[in-house]
Image (tube, rainbow, N blue to C red):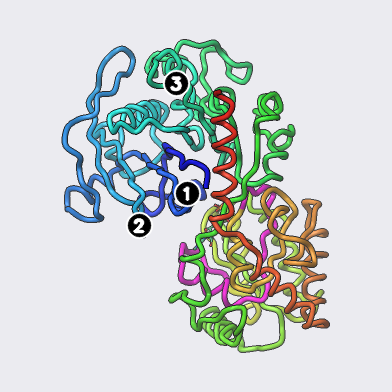
Amino acid sequence: MQNPLKILFISSEVAPFAKIGGLGDVAGSLPKALREMGHDVRVVMPAYGSIEQAVRSGQGGVEPLPGQLLVSMGGSIYPAGVFEGRLPGSDVPIYFIAEWNLFDRDQIYGYEDDPYRFAFFSRAAIELARGLEFRPDILHANDWHTAPAVTWLATTGQAEDYHRGIPSLFTIHNLSHQGNSGWDILDYLGVITHSLTEEGFGEVNFMARGIYHATLINTVSPTYAREIMTKEGGAGLDELLRYRGGDVRGILNGLDYDSWNPREDLRIAANYDPDDMDGRIQNRWALQARANLPHKEDIPLLGMVTRLDWQKGLDITGHVVYLLLNGVAGEVQIVVLGTGAAHYEQMFAHLAYQFPDKMAAFFDYDPGLAAQIYAGSDMFLMPSLFEPCGLGQLISMRYGTVPIVRATGGLVDTVADGVTGFSFLEYDSNAFLNAAERAIYTYNTDRKTWHEIQNNGMASDNSWERSAEGYVKLYREAIARMD
Ligand code: ADP
Protein backbone atom coordinates (compact mmCIF):
# COMPACT_ATOMS: atom_id res chain seq x y z
CA MET A 1 0.00 0.00 0.00
CA GLN A 2 1.06 3.61 -0.59
CA ASN A 3 1.65 5.69 2.53
CA PRO A 4 -1.35 5.71 4.85
CA LEU A 5 -3.24 9.01 5.00
CA LYS A 6 -4.33 11.15 7.92
CA ILE A 7 -7.93 12.11 7.29
CA LEU A 8 -9.98 14.61 9.29
CA PHE A 9 -13.59 13.62 8.59
CA ILE A 10 -16.20 16.09 9.79
CA SER A 11 -19.95 15.69 9.62
CA SER A 12 -23.10 17.00 11.31
CA GLU A 13 -24.50 13.44 11.38
CA VAL A 14 -22.72 10.18 12.15
CA ALA A 15 -24.70 6.93 12.55
CA PRO A 16 -25.47 5.55 15.06
CA PHE A 17 -24.87 8.65 17.22
CA ALA A 18 -27.11 11.00 15.25
CA LYS A 19 -28.70 10.32 11.90
CA ILE A 20 -31.43 11.84 9.76
CA GLY A 21 -30.52 10.45 6.35
CA GLY A 22 -27.88 9.10 4.01
CA LEU A 23 -25.23 11.53 5.28
CA GLY A 24 -25.30 9.82 8.69
CA ASP A 25 -24.95 6.39 7.11
CA VAL A 26 -21.95 7.45 5.05
CA ALA A 27 -20.26 9.12 8.02
CA GLY A 28 -20.81 6.01 10.15
CA SER A 29 -19.52 3.55 7.55
CA LEU A 30 -16.91 5.15 5.29
CA PRO A 31 -14.39 5.99 8.06
CA LYS A 32 -14.47 2.36 9.22
CA ALA A 33 -13.73 1.12 5.70
CA LEU A 34 -10.89 3.66 5.42
CA ARG A 35 -9.49 2.48 8.74
CA GLU A 36 -9.59 -1.13 7.57
CA MET A 37 -7.48 -0.04 4.61
CA GLY A 38 -4.88 1.25 7.08
CA HIS A 39 -5.61 4.99 7.08
CA ASP A 40 -5.66 7.13 10.20
CA VAL A 41 -9.10 8.70 10.12
CA ARG A 42 -10.58 10.84 12.88
CA VAL A 43 -14.26 11.73 12.87
CA VAL A 44 -15.66 14.91 14.44
CA MET A 45 -19.32 15.77 15.05
CA PRO A 46 -21.28 18.05 17.44
CA ALA A 47 -22.35 16.77 20.87
CA TYR A 48 -26.13 17.05 20.51
CA GLY A 49 -28.45 16.69 23.50
CA SER A 50 -28.64 12.89 23.22
CA ILE A 51 -24.85 12.66 23.36
CA GLU A 52 -24.55 15.03 26.32
CA GLN A 53 -27.14 12.81 27.99
CA ALA A 54 -25.14 9.65 27.25
CA VAL A 55 -22.00 11.24 28.70
CA ARG A 56 -23.83 12.43 31.83
CA SER A 57 -25.23 8.96 32.44
CA GLY A 58 -21.92 7.27 31.66
CA GLN A 59 -23.38 5.27 28.75
CA GLY A 60 -22.33 4.65 25.19
CA GLY A 61 -18.58 4.57 25.73
CA VAL A 62 -18.25 8.34 25.22
CA GLU A 63 -15.95 10.12 27.70
CA PRO A 64 -15.03 13.77 28.19
CA LEU A 65 -11.43 14.67 27.42
CA PRO A 66 -9.63 16.78 30.01
CA GLY A 67 -9.15 20.48 29.36
CA GLN A 68 -10.92 22.85 27.03
CA LEU A 69 -10.79 23.65 23.39
CA LEU A 70 -10.43 27.37 22.70
CA VAL A 71 -12.17 28.45 19.54
CA SER A 72 -11.66 31.90 18.06
CA MET A 73 -14.90 33.23 16.58
CA GLY A 74 -15.62 36.79 15.52
CA GLY A 75 -12.57 38.11 17.35
CA SER A 76 -13.44 36.48 20.69
CA ILE A 77 -12.27 33.22 22.20
CA TYR A 78 -14.95 30.69 23.16
CA PRO A 79 -14.26 27.56 25.19
CA ALA A 80 -15.75 24.20 24.22
CA GLY A 81 -15.57 20.72 25.68
CA VAL A 82 -14.56 17.62 23.77
CA PHE A 83 -15.87 14.08 24.23
CA GLU A 84 -14.18 11.05 22.75
CA GLY A 85 -15.55 7.68 21.68
CA ARG A 86 -15.10 5.05 18.99
CA LEU A 87 -17.23 4.27 15.96
CA PRO A 88 -19.00 1.06 17.01
CA GLY A 89 -17.32 -2.10 15.79
CA SER A 90 -14.04 -0.31 15.09
CA ASP A 91 -11.16 1.58 16.65
CA VAL A 92 -11.91 4.77 14.69
CA PRO A 93 -11.82 7.71 17.13
CA ILE A 94 -14.83 9.99 17.08
CA TYR A 95 -14.74 13.36 18.81
CA PHE A 96 -17.76 15.39 19.83
CA ILE A 97 -17.61 19.17 20.13
CA ALA A 98 -19.53 20.04 23.30
CA GLU A 99 -20.90 23.57 23.49
CA TRP A 100 -24.04 23.63 25.60
CA ASN A 101 -25.61 26.74 24.13
CA LEU A 102 -25.25 25.59 20.57
CA PHE A 103 -25.56 21.80 20.52
CA ASP A 104 -27.17 20.52 23.72
CA ARG A 105 -30.61 20.51 22.12
CA ASP A 106 -33.18 17.86 21.18
CA GLN A 107 -32.90 18.18 17.43
CA ILE A 108 -29.96 18.11 15.05
CA TYR A 109 -31.32 20.82 12.73
CA GLY A 110 -34.20 23.23 12.49
CA TYR A 111 -33.01 26.14 14.64
CA GLU A 112 -32.76 29.72 13.50
CA ASP A 113 -29.10 29.90 14.47
CA ASP A 114 -28.13 26.73 12.54
CA PRO A 115 -25.58 28.58 10.35
CA TYR A 116 -23.87 29.90 13.50
CA ARG A 117 -23.99 26.52 15.20
CA PHE A 118 -22.31 24.80 12.28
CA ALA A 119 -19.85 27.62 11.61
CA PHE A 120 -18.71 27.20 15.21
CA PHE A 121 -18.59 23.42 14.85
CA SER A 122 -16.52 23.69 11.66
CA ARG A 123 -13.92 25.99 13.23
CA ALA A 124 -13.82 23.93 16.40
CA ALA A 125 -13.20 20.72 14.43
CA ILE A 126 -10.13 22.23 12.79
CA GLU A 127 -8.85 23.60 16.10
CA LEU A 128 -9.41 20.23 17.73
CA ALA A 129 -7.19 18.53 15.16
CA ARG A 130 -4.44 21.01 15.97
CA GLY A 131 -4.99 20.42 19.70
CA LEU A 132 -4.64 16.68 19.15
CA GLU A 133 -1.49 17.28 17.12
CA PHE A 134 -3.22 15.59 14.24
CA ARG A 135 -2.28 17.60 11.17
CA PRO A 136 -4.44 15.98 8.51
CA ASP A 137 -3.26 15.22 5.00
CA ILE A 138 -6.80 16.06 3.94
CA LEU A 139 -9.96 17.60 5.37
CA HIS A 140 -13.07 15.69 4.30
CA ALA A 141 -16.15 17.87 4.85
CA ASN A 142 -19.75 16.86 4.20
CA ASP A 143 -22.70 19.02 3.11
CA TRP A 144 -23.26 22.69 3.95
CA HIS A 145 -22.85 22.26 7.72
CA THR A 146 -19.14 21.66 7.35
CA ALA A 147 -18.56 23.93 4.34
CA PRO A 148 -17.43 26.70 6.72
CA ALA A 149 -14.39 24.53 7.50
CA VAL A 150 -13.59 24.29 3.79
CA THR A 151 -14.00 28.03 3.36
CA TRP A 152 -11.90 28.87 6.41
CA LEU A 153 -9.13 26.48 5.40
CA ALA A 154 -9.00 27.84 1.85
CA THR A 155 -8.88 31.49 2.99
CA THR A 156 -7.79 32.47 6.50
CA GLY A 157 -6.25 29.04 7.09
CA GLN A 158 -3.83 29.48 4.21
CA ALA A 159 -2.29 32.43 6.01
CA GLU A 160 -1.26 30.18 8.89
CA ASP A 161 1.87 28.08 8.47
CA TYR A 162 0.28 25.18 10.29
CA HIS A 163 -2.70 24.89 7.94
CA ARG A 164 -1.14 26.01 4.70
CA GLY A 165 -1.28 23.33 2.05
CA ILE A 166 -3.97 21.13 3.62
CA PRO A 167 -6.41 20.27 0.81
CA SER A 168 -10.11 19.57 1.21
CA LEU A 169 -12.67 17.25 -0.29
CA PHE A 170 -16.25 18.51 -0.09
CA THR A 171 -18.93 15.83 -0.46
CA ILE A 172 -22.46 16.79 -1.48
CA HIS A 173 -25.03 14.40 -0.05
CA ASN A 174 -28.03 16.67 -0.40
CA LEU A 175 -27.81 19.69 -2.65
CA SER A 176 -31.19 21.07 -1.67
CA HIS A 177 -30.14 22.21 1.82
CA GLN A 178 -27.64 25.01 1.24
CA GLY A 179 -27.21 26.83 4.54
CA ASN A 180 -28.14 30.43 3.80
CA SER A 181 -27.24 33.14 6.23
CA GLY A 182 -26.53 36.85 6.57
CA TRP A 183 -23.11 38.22 5.58
CA ASP A 184 -22.06 38.76 9.22
CA ILE A 185 -21.51 35.03 9.55
CA LEU A 186 -18.23 35.47 7.67
CA ASP A 187 -17.04 37.87 10.39
CA TYR A 188 -18.03 35.30 12.97
CA LEU A 189 -16.09 32.66 11.01
CA GLY A 190 -13.09 34.96 10.69
CA VAL A 191 -13.03 35.03 6.91
CA ILE A 192 -12.61 38.03 4.64
CA THR A 193 -13.75 37.24 1.13
CA HIS A 194 -15.83 38.39 -1.82
CA SER A 195 -19.40 37.39 -2.56
CA LEU A 196 -20.35 34.73 -5.09
CA THR A 197 -22.77 35.13 -7.98
CA GLU A 198 -24.97 32.52 -6.34
CA GLU A 199 -25.35 34.63 -3.22
CA GLY A 200 -28.01 37.33 -2.98
CA PHE A 201 -27.01 40.77 -1.69
CA GLY A 202 -25.75 40.48 1.88
CA GLU A 203 -26.29 36.74 1.88
CA VAL A 204 -23.94 33.79 2.33
CA ASN A 205 -24.67 30.37 0.83
CA PHE A 206 -22.47 27.77 2.50
CA MET A 207 -23.16 24.99 0.00
CA ALA A 208 -21.98 27.32 -2.77
CA ARG A 209 -18.91 28.28 -0.72
CA GLY A 210 -18.00 24.64 -0.11
CA ILE A 211 -18.20 24.00 -3.85
CA TYR A 212 -16.25 27.15 -4.63
CA HIS A 213 -13.44 26.68 -2.10
CA ALA A 214 -12.87 22.91 -1.93
CA THR A 215 -9.86 21.37 -3.63
CA LEU A 216 -12.11 18.64 -5.02
CA ILE A 217 -15.84 18.06 -4.84
CA ASN A 218 -17.81 14.86 -5.08
CA THR A 219 -21.31 13.61 -4.77
CA VAL A 220 -22.64 10.16 -4.04
CA SER A 221 -23.02 8.72 -7.54
CA PRO A 222 -21.47 9.44 -10.95
CA THR A 223 -24.83 10.07 -12.62
CA TYR A 224 -25.97 12.47 -9.91
CA ALA A 225 -22.64 14.28 -10.32
CA ARG A 226 -23.59 14.94 -13.94
CA GLU A 227 -27.21 15.76 -13.15
CA ILE A 228 -26.37 18.48 -10.62
CA MET A 229 -24.48 20.32 -13.36
CA THR A 230 -27.75 20.75 -15.28
CA LYS A 231 -30.32 23.46 -14.73
CA GLU A 232 -32.98 20.90 -13.76
CA GLY A 233 -30.81 19.14 -11.18
CA GLY A 234 -28.58 21.98 -9.98
CA ALA A 235 -30.82 23.57 -7.32
CA GLY A 236 -29.56 26.99 -8.45
CA LEU A 237 -25.89 25.99 -8.21
CA ASP A 238 -25.46 24.31 -11.61
CA GLU A 239 -23.46 27.17 -13.10
CA LEU A 240 -21.00 27.10 -10.21
CA LEU A 241 -20.82 23.31 -10.44
CA ARG A 242 -20.12 23.53 -14.16
CA TYR A 243 -17.44 26.12 -13.43
CA ARG A 244 -15.82 23.57 -11.11
CA GLY A 245 -16.85 20.76 -13.47
CA GLY A 246 -13.34 19.32 -13.91
CA ASP A 247 -13.10 18.87 -10.14
CA VAL A 248 -16.53 17.32 -9.53
CA ARG A 249 -16.62 13.51 -9.20
CA GLY A 250 -19.16 10.86 -8.27
CA ILE A 251 -18.53 7.97 -5.88
CA LEU A 252 -21.32 5.57 -5.11
CA ASN A 253 -22.19 5.02 -1.48
CA GLY A 254 -21.71 1.52 -0.20
CA LEU A 255 -24.17 -0.59 1.75
CA ASP A 256 -23.35 -1.65 5.28
CA TYR A 257 -23.02 -5.37 4.55
CA ASP A 258 -22.94 -6.24 8.26
CA SER A 259 -26.31 -4.67 8.98
CA TRP A 260 -27.89 -5.78 5.72
CA ASN A 261 -27.17 -9.45 5.34
CA PRO A 262 -29.98 -11.95 4.65
CA ARG A 263 -27.81 -14.75 6.04
CA GLU A 264 -27.67 -13.16 9.51
CA ASP A 265 -30.51 -10.63 9.68
CA LEU A 266 -32.42 -11.40 12.89
CA ARG A 267 -35.37 -9.22 11.87
CA ILE A 268 -36.54 -11.53 9.09
CA ALA A 269 -38.53 -14.77 9.40
CA ALA A 270 -35.85 -17.05 7.90
CA ASN A 271 -32.25 -16.53 6.85
CA TYR A 272 -30.92 -17.38 3.41
CA ASP A 273 -28.12 -16.59 1.03
CA PRO A 274 -27.47 -16.78 -2.72
CA ASP A 275 -26.54 -20.49 -2.47
CA ASP A 276 -29.61 -21.44 -0.53
CA MET A 277 -32.67 -19.33 -1.21
CA ASP A 278 -35.18 -21.66 0.49
CA GLY A 279 -35.70 -19.19 3.34
CA ARG A 280 -37.27 -16.68 1.00
CA ILE A 281 -40.58 -18.52 0.85
CA GLN A 282 -40.96 -18.32 4.62
CA ASN A 283 -40.25 -14.62 4.46
CA ARG A 284 -42.99 -14.33 1.90
CA TRP A 285 -45.46 -16.15 4.17
CA ALA A 286 -44.40 -13.98 7.09
CA LEU A 287 -44.89 -10.80 5.09
CA GLN A 288 -48.27 -11.89 3.79
CA ALA A 289 -49.34 -12.78 7.33
CA ARG A 290 -48.15 -9.44 8.70
CA ALA A 291 -49.88 -7.58 5.89
CA ASN A 292 -53.03 -9.64 6.30
CA LEU A 293 -52.90 -10.73 2.67
CA PRO A 294 -53.89 -14.22 1.46
CA HIS A 295 -51.03 -16.75 1.31
CA LYS A 296 -50.36 -17.08 -2.38
CA GLU A 297 -47.19 -18.50 -3.80
CA ASP A 298 -47.00 -17.81 -7.49
CA ILE A 299 -48.08 -14.23 -7.91
CA PRO A 300 -45.66 -11.32 -7.79
CA LEU A 301 -45.44 -9.54 -4.45
CA LEU A 302 -44.34 -5.92 -4.83
CA GLY A 303 -42.80 -4.03 -1.93
CA MET A 304 -42.01 -0.38 -1.29
CA VAL A 305 -40.15 1.15 1.67
CA THR A 306 -39.77 4.89 1.43
CA ARG A 307 -40.02 8.32 2.90
CA LEU A 308 -43.35 9.67 1.67
CA ASP A 309 -41.78 12.63 -0.06
CA TRP A 310 -42.21 14.03 -3.57
CA GLN A 311 -38.54 13.20 -4.30
CA LYS A 312 -39.44 9.52 -4.14
CA GLY A 313 -41.67 9.52 -7.23
CA LEU A 314 -44.96 9.11 -5.41
CA ASP A 315 -46.75 11.44 -7.82
CA ILE A 316 -46.43 8.84 -10.57
CA THR A 317 -47.02 5.87 -8.27
CA GLY A 318 -50.70 6.05 -7.31
CA HIS A 319 -51.99 5.51 -10.81
CA VAL A 320 -49.61 2.60 -11.44
CA VAL A 321 -50.56 0.87 -8.20
CA TYR A 322 -54.24 1.39 -9.01
CA LEU A 323 -53.89 -0.22 -12.44
CA LEU A 324 -51.80 -3.10 -11.10
CA LEU A 325 -54.37 -3.78 -8.37
CA ASN A 326 -57.00 -3.81 -11.10
CA GLY A 327 -55.12 -6.65 -12.74
CA VAL A 328 -53.65 -4.97 -15.85
CA ALA A 329 -50.60 -7.22 -15.54
CA GLY A 330 -52.33 -10.19 -13.87
CA GLU A 331 -52.75 -10.79 -10.18
CA VAL A 332 -50.33 -9.02 -7.80
CA GLN A 333 -49.96 -8.15 -4.13
CA ILE A 334 -48.47 -4.86 -2.91
CA VAL A 335 -47.06 -3.88 0.51
CA VAL A 336 -46.02 -0.30 1.23
CA LEU A 337 -44.16 1.02 4.28
CA GLY A 338 -43.51 4.74 4.63
CA THR A 339 -43.83 7.89 6.67
CA GLY A 340 -44.12 11.45 5.53
CA ALA A 341 -46.58 13.69 3.72
CA ALA A 342 -50.22 13.16 4.70
CA HIS A 343 -51.55 13.26 1.14
CA TYR A 344 -49.37 10.31 0.11
CA GLU A 345 -50.51 8.39 3.18
CA GLN A 346 -54.08 9.06 2.15
CA MET A 347 -53.39 7.90 -1.38
CA PHE A 348 -51.97 4.55 -0.22
CA ALA A 349 -54.53 4.16 2.58
CA HIS A 350 -57.30 4.63 0.04
CA LEU A 351 -55.85 2.04 -2.34
CA ALA A 352 -55.37 -0.46 0.49
CA TYR A 353 -58.94 0.14 1.63
CA GLN A 354 -60.27 -0.48 -1.89
CA PHE A 355 -58.24 -3.67 -2.36
CA PRO A 356 -57.84 -5.18 1.13
CA ASP A 357 -56.94 -8.65 -0.16
CA LYS A 358 -54.27 -7.32 -2.51
CA MET A 359 -52.62 -4.39 -0.81
CA ALA A 360 -51.47 -3.31 2.65
CA ALA A 361 -49.98 0.04 3.67
CA PHE A 362 -48.09 0.77 6.92
CA PHE A 363 -47.39 4.35 7.97
CA ASP A 364 -44.64 3.83 10.47
CA TYR A 365 -40.90 4.01 10.75
CA ASP A 366 -40.28 0.30 11.30
CA PRO A 367 -36.84 -1.13 10.44
CA GLY A 368 -38.00 -4.67 11.26
CA LEU A 369 -40.93 -4.54 8.87
CA ALA A 370 -38.68 -2.88 6.29
CA ALA A 371 -36.29 -5.85 6.48
CA GLN A 372 -39.25 -8.24 6.16
CA ILE A 373 -40.41 -6.41 3.03
CA TYR A 374 -36.93 -6.57 1.49
CA ALA A 375 -36.73 -10.30 2.27
CA GLY A 376 -40.31 -11.30 1.45
CA SER A 377 -41.13 -9.39 -1.74
CA ASP A 378 -40.36 -10.37 -5.31
CA MET A 379 -39.99 -6.82 -6.59
CA PHE A 380 -39.11 -3.47 -5.01
CA LEU A 381 -40.53 -0.21 -6.34
CA MET A 382 -38.33 2.90 -6.40
CA PRO A 383 -39.61 5.37 -9.01
CA SER A 384 -37.66 8.38 -7.65
CA LEU A 385 -37.87 11.78 -9.28
CA PHE A 386 -34.25 12.25 -8.24
CA GLU A 387 -31.93 10.09 -6.18
CA PRO A 388 -28.36 11.11 -5.26
CA CYS A 389 -27.44 7.46 -4.56
CA GLY A 390 -30.29 5.50 -2.96
CA LEU A 391 -30.07 2.64 -0.50
CA GLY A 392 -33.39 0.89 -1.06
CA GLN A 393 -32.34 -0.59 -4.39
CA LEU A 394 -29.02 -1.79 -2.93
CA ILE A 395 -30.75 -3.45 0.01
CA SER A 396 -33.39 -5.08 -2.16
CA MET A 397 -30.74 -6.50 -4.54
CA ARG A 398 -28.77 -7.84 -1.58
CA TYR A 399 -31.94 -9.63 -0.41
CA GLY A 400 -32.75 -11.08 -3.85
CA THR A 401 -35.69 -8.75 -4.47
CA VAL A 402 -35.65 -7.30 -7.97
CA PRO A 403 -35.75 -3.48 -8.05
CA ILE A 404 -37.94 -1.55 -10.48
CA VAL A 405 -36.45 1.93 -10.59
CA ARG A 406 -36.53 5.19 -12.45
CA ALA A 407 -33.23 5.73 -14.27
CA THR A 408 -32.03 8.74 -12.30
CA GLY A 409 -28.94 9.48 -10.17
CA GLY A 410 -27.49 6.54 -8.31
CA LEU A 411 -30.26 4.28 -9.57
CA VAL A 412 -28.70 4.47 -13.05
CA ASP A 413 -25.32 3.50 -11.66
CA THR A 414 -26.52 0.54 -9.61
CA VAL A 415 -29.43 -1.06 -11.47
CA ALA A 416 -28.96 -2.39 -15.01
CA ASP A 417 -32.20 -2.91 -16.92
CA GLY A 418 -32.83 -6.59 -17.56
CA VAL A 419 -29.60 -7.57 -15.74
CA THR A 420 -30.05 -6.66 -12.07
CA GLY A 421 -33.49 -5.06 -12.23
CA PHE A 422 -35.85 -3.07 -14.42
CA SER A 423 -35.69 0.64 -15.11
CA PHE A 424 -37.53 3.39 -16.95
CA LEU A 425 -36.48 6.88 -17.93
CA GLU A 426 -39.44 9.23 -18.43
CA TYR A 427 -40.92 10.55 -15.22
CA ASP A 428 -44.49 9.45 -15.91
CA SER A 429 -46.90 6.73 -14.90
CA ASN A 430 -46.94 5.05 -18.31
CA ALA A 431 -43.20 4.54 -18.32
CA PHE A 432 -43.31 3.25 -14.75
CA LEU A 433 -46.20 0.90 -15.53
CA ASN A 434 -44.39 -0.37 -18.59
CA ALA A 435 -41.30 -1.29 -16.54
CA ALA A 436 -43.46 -2.96 -13.88
CA GLU A 437 -45.28 -4.93 -16.57
CA ARG A 438 -41.99 -6.09 -18.08
CA ALA A 439 -40.85 -7.27 -14.66
CA ILE A 440 -44.13 -9.03 -13.94
CA TYR A 441 -44.15 -10.65 -17.37
CA THR A 442 -40.64 -12.01 -16.84
CA TYR A 443 -41.58 -13.27 -13.39
CA ASN A 444 -44.73 -14.96 -14.69
CA THR A 445 -43.33 -16.49 -17.87
CA ASP A 446 -39.58 -16.96 -17.54
CA ARG A 447 -38.44 -18.02 -14.08
CA LYS A 448 -34.98 -18.93 -15.32
CA THR A 449 -34.29 -15.34 -16.40
CA TRP A 450 -35.95 -14.09 -13.22
CA HIS A 451 -33.60 -16.12 -11.03
CA GLU A 452 -30.64 -14.88 -13.07
CA ILE A 453 -31.68 -11.28 -12.42
CA GLN A 454 -32.08 -12.06 -8.71
CA ASN A 455 -28.66 -13.70 -8.60
CA ASN A 456 -26.97 -10.89 -10.52
CA GLY A 457 -28.34 -8.39 -8.00
CA MET A 458 -27.20 -10.48 -5.05
CA ALA A 459 -23.74 -10.83 -6.60
CA SER A 460 -23.23 -7.13 -7.34
CA ASP A 461 -20.55 -5.46 -5.24
CA ASN A 462 -21.91 -2.43 -3.44
CA SER A 463 -19.60 -2.73 -0.47
CA TRP A 464 -18.04 0.16 1.42
CA GLU A 465 -14.61 -1.24 0.61
CA ARG A 466 -15.17 -0.38 -3.02
CA SER A 467 -16.40 3.13 -2.22
CA ALA A 468 -13.52 3.72 0.20
CA GLU A 469 -11.05 2.92 -2.55
CA GLY A 470 -12.70 5.60 -4.67
CA TYR A 471 -12.39 8.13 -1.83
CA VAL A 472 -8.72 7.34 -1.23
CA LYS A 473 -8.04 8.00 -4.91
CA LEU A 474 -9.74 11.38 -4.59
CA TYR A 475 -7.82 12.23 -1.41
CA ARG A 476 -4.54 11.49 -3.15
CA GLU A 477 -5.55 13.54 -6.16
CA ALA A 478 -6.45 16.50 -3.92
CA ILE A 479 -3.16 16.16 -2.03
CA ALA A 480 -1.22 16.11 -5.30
CA ARG A 481 -2.91 19.38 -6.29
CA MET A 482 -1.24 21.13 -3.37
CA ASP A 483 2.31 20.22 -4.45
P1 ADP B 1 -33.43 8.49 1.53
O1 ADP B 1 -32.13 8.57 2.30
O2 ADP B 1 -33.59 9.56 0.49
O3 ADP B 1 -34.65 8.36 2.39
P2 ADP B 1 -32.45 5.90 0.65
O4 ADP B 1 -32.99 4.89 -0.30
O5 ADP B 1 -31.04 6.35 0.42
O6 ADP B 1 -33.43 7.14 0.68
O7 ADP B 1 -32.49 5.33 2.15
C1 ADP B 1 -33.70 5.04 2.76
C2 ADP B 1 -33.41 4.13 3.94
O8 ADP B 1 -34.41 4.34 4.94
C3 ADP B 1 -33.49 2.67 3.58
O9 ADP B 1 -32.61 1.95 4.44
C4 ADP B 1 -34.94 2.32 3.89
O10 ADP B 1 -35.09 0.94 4.18
C5 ADP B 1 -35.15 3.15 5.13
N1 ADP B 1 -36.55 3.55 5.36
C6 ADP B 1 -37.26 4.48 4.66
N2 ADP B 1 -38.52 4.57 5.16
C7 ADP B 1 -38.60 3.68 6.16
C8 ADP B 1 -39.64 3.29 7.07
N3 ADP B 1 -40.84 3.87 7.03
N4 ADP B 1 -39.37 2.34 7.99
C9 ADP B 1 -38.14 1.76 8.04
N5 ADP B 1 -37.13 2.07 7.21
C10 ADP B 1 -37.35 3.02 6.29
Task: Determine which residue is flagged by label 2.
Answer: 88
- Note whether 343 is above or below 456 in the view shown: above
- Determine whether, in the image, residue 28 is placed left or right of residue 174: left
In the image shown, does 188 or 201 lie closer to the viewer?
188
Residue at (71%, 27%) from the top-left corner? 242
- Give the quarter of the image for residue 378: bottom right
Badge 2 marks a residue whose secondary structure is: loop
Task: Say which residue appears at 65% left-offset and 38% top-offset.
Answer: 249
Residue drawn 53% across and 33% down? 169
How far apart are labels 1 and 2 at the CA level?
14 Å
Q: Which residues are magenta?
A: 361-389
Q: In the picture shown, does residue 171 fall above or below 221?
A: above
Name the residue at 65% across, 28% down: 237
Mark sitting earlier along the chain (3/1) = 1
Question: Mark 3 — residue?
Answer: 152
Residues at marks 3 and 2, CA–CA distance in whole angstroms: 31 Å
Instruction: Look at label 1 and name its amino acid.
Output: Leu
Mark drawn on residue 316: none
Numbered mark located on residue 34 in the image? 1
N-terminal-most mark, 1 or 2: 1
Q: Position of residue 347 (x, y in %)?
A: 63, 61
Residue 37 lies left or right of residue 322; in this view the side is left
Inter-mark Cα distance, 3 to 1: 25 Å
